[in-house]
Image (spheres, rainbow, N blue to C red):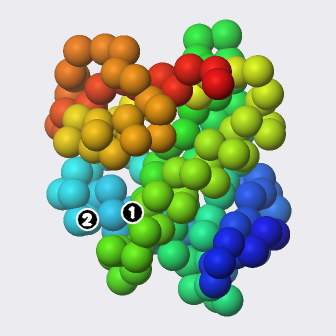
Amino acid sequence: MIALSKYTVDVRRLDEFSALDLYAMLKMRVDVFVVEQTCPYPELDGNDPDCLHLRLIDGEDLLACARLWRPTTDHLPRIGRVAVSPNHRGKGLGDALMREAIIECEKAYPGEAIEISAQAHLQKFYASFGFERTSEEYLEDGIPHVDMIRPLR
């Protein structure tokens, strides 16, 4: 774990989580993506075991999380499931989470660009981290999205 100001950055594989830490992360993702966004979709999609999971934590309190996909023959390394706890928004955690996710992707998969499937209304946010739009807008689980790539720097 690396200290980030008063927060701690934790990156691990799914099988390295305690049951309580795993529960907290999955609950936050469901609370944000399914309940808050009123979007019933398969949050538990079978991909978590193949990904790294990044969390911003403060003691036992989960502040934010993201899922980091390894590259495949069809995809570059990807950042997904980017979520900040509703109780901790407005504190710059979204920016911190994206900075750390990019750093961890670059460490784990050097020499690779990074892709995301971004909710369309967040394009400006992701562009501030160097992501460029690479697709037309499309619906994913009823929410407008665009594909974006952060080229190698």
Residue pictured at 40% horizontal, 76% vertical: 91
Residue 72 in the figure: left or right of residue 64: right
Question: Element at badge 1?
Answer: helix
Where residue 48 appears, x then y in whole percent? 62, 46
Where residue 63 appears, x then y in whole percent? 51, 75
Residue type, mark 2 in image: Val
Residue 38 in the figure: left or right of residue 107: left
Residue pictured at 75% horizontal, 74% vertical: 3
Residue of label 1: 30
Q: Earlier in the sequence, mark 1 or mark 2?
A: 1
Q: Cβ–Cβ below 8 Å for labels 1 and 2?
A: yes
Q: Quadrant of residue 132?
A: top left
Is 124 in front, or is 23? 124
Residue type, mark 1 in image: Val
Where residue 1 appears, x then y in whole percent? 81, 69
Up the image or down, 81 lies above or below 114; here it is below
Q: Quadrant of the image for the C terminus?
A: top right
Q: Is residue 64 visible?
A: yes
Q: Which mark is residue 127?
A: none
Task: Bin the neighbour count of mark 1 within 10 Å (Cα to Cα): few under 14, some 14-19, many 20 and up.
Answer: many
Where residue 31 appears, x then y in whole percent? 35, 68
Residue of label 2: 35
